[in-house]
């Protein structure tokens, strides 16, 4: 009888420990994709935010190259829009991570879900060659963001993260269509 009570007490302590750590948003207990009713987010939401921040930052960095290297006014205007859209989204994603007590990832673009796009050739190009290369690379980059956002929609649980994912899909899919037309 005593062994059963000790075992039950240990199980109760572990269960309580799991509940308290789940509220923090960082424990091993939150590594499952099961949404937490109390916290309103899951690990897929955290992963989405952690990966989308450096992904968006790379797009902003690419957009900053356009004024000094590109010549097409339409590419310049699009680059400005990309930067204006993604800077506030980076802040929103950062705020989500803070709210969830989750650390952002480093700026390792290779782990950000878009294949570690190498911009070396882009940085060396100028004029029409640059414009064409920028459009091609940004299409690929946007496709990566759309895929990451689709994963968030299917596996995430945070209404805020899912709303942002849908916004990213809508905006970037429209820009992909625009860039494909510009390449023709």
Image: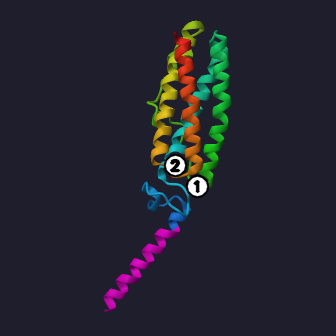
Q: Nearer the viewer, residue 116 or 113?
A: 113
Give the CA separation, mark 2 to mark 1: 10 Å
Label 1 packing within 10 angstroms: few (<14), some (14-19), many (20+): some
Residue at the image point whose x is 48% and y is 72% from the top: 17
Label 2 packing within 10 angstroms: few (<14), some (14-19), many (20+): many
Which residue has dot 2 on it?
Answer: 45
Earlier residue among tags 2 and 1: 2
Q: Is residue 18 magenta?
A: yes
Q: Nearer the viewer, residue 44 or 125?
A: 44
5 left or right of 26? left
Report helix, strand or loop for mark 1: loop
Q: Nearer the viewer, residue 109 or 9?
A: 9
Q: Nearer the viewer, residue 143 or 65?
A: 143
Residue at the image point whose x is 50% and y is 33% from the top: 146
Quick check: 155 above or below 120? below
In this rendering, does residue 136 appear at all? yes
Dominant secondary structure (helix, strand or loop) of the stretch shown in magenta: helix
124 left or right of 64? left
Are circles 2 and 1 on residues that touch, CB within 8 Å? yes
Report helix, strand or loop for mark 2: helix
Which residue has dot 1 on it?
Answer: 100
């Amino acid at each position: 009888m005593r062994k059963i009570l000790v075992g039950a007490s240990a199980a109760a302590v572990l269960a309580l420990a799991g509940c308290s750590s789940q509220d923090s948003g960082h424990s091993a207990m939150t590594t499952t994709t099961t949404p937490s009713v109390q916290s309103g987010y899951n690990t897929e939401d955290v992963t989405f935010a952690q990966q989308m921040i450096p992904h968006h930052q790379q797009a902003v960095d690419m957009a900053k190259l356009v004024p000094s290297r590109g010549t097409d006014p339409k590419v310049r205007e699009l680059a400005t829009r990309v930067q204006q859209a993604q800077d506030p989204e980076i802040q929103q994603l950062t705020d989500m991570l803070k709210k969830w007590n989750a650390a952002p990832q480093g700026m390792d673009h290779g782990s950000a879900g878009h294949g570690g796009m190498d911009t070396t050739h882009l940085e060396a190009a100028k004029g029409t060659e640059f414009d064409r290369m920028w459009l091609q690379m940004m299409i690929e980059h946007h496709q990566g963001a759309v895929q990451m956002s689709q994963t968030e929609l299917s596996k995430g649980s945070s209404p805020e993260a899912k709303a942002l994912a849908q916004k990213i899909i809508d905006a970037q899919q429209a820009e992909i269509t625009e860039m494909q037309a510009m390449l023709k």
